[in-house]
Image (tube, rainbow, N blue to C red):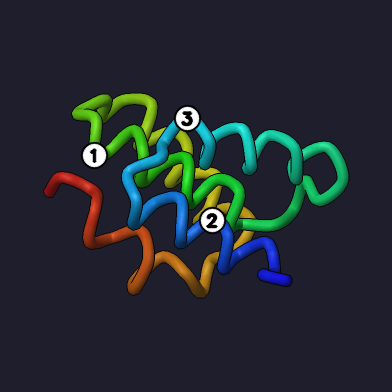
Amino acid sequence: KKDWKEQAIEYFDAGKFDELVAHCKEREKTHKNDPNIYYWQARVHHMEGESEKAAKLFAQVSKIAPDWHKDFVEPYIEK
């Protein structure tokens, strides 16, 4: 059985963004401080050109996990 993150990556790679967002929202109910929840939703919005929504979610990632900022947030933030 895949763990949560493996399933998230699989949805993303397959372009199943609706499933991925639902997967994130389900986990958020019990794991509010998991940066993965916000990271994967931000990636979806980024891919779909919704930069404001993506930026808010990436900011949430940086707030929860500051050590993720350089590698996982900065590459997607417009300079």
Tell me if 5 is positioned left or right of 69 in this view. right
Circle 2 residue = 8
| Dot 1 amino acid type | Met
Q: Earlier in the sequence, mark 1 or mark 3?
A: 3
* Extreme residue toward the left, this view: 79
Q: Determine crowd level at label 3: few under 14, some 14-19, many 20+ residues with C-alpha closer than 10 A.
A: few
Name the quadrant containing residue 46: top left
Tell me if 62 is positioned left or right of 28 in this view. left
Q: Say what secondary structure mark 3 lies in.
A: helix
* Numbered mark located on residue 18 in the image: 3
Circles 1 and 3, Cβ within 8 Å, touching? The answer is: no
Q: Determine crowd level at label 2: few under 14, some 14-19, many 20+ residues with C-alpha closer than 10 A.
A: many
Q: Position of residue 47 (x, y in %)?
A: 24, 39
Circles 3 and 2, Cβ within 8 Å, touching? The answer is: no
Depth check, front residue: 51 or 9: 9
| Dot 2 amino acid type | Ala
Circle 1 residue = 47
- Residue at the spot 53% in from the left edge and 56% down from the top edge: 8
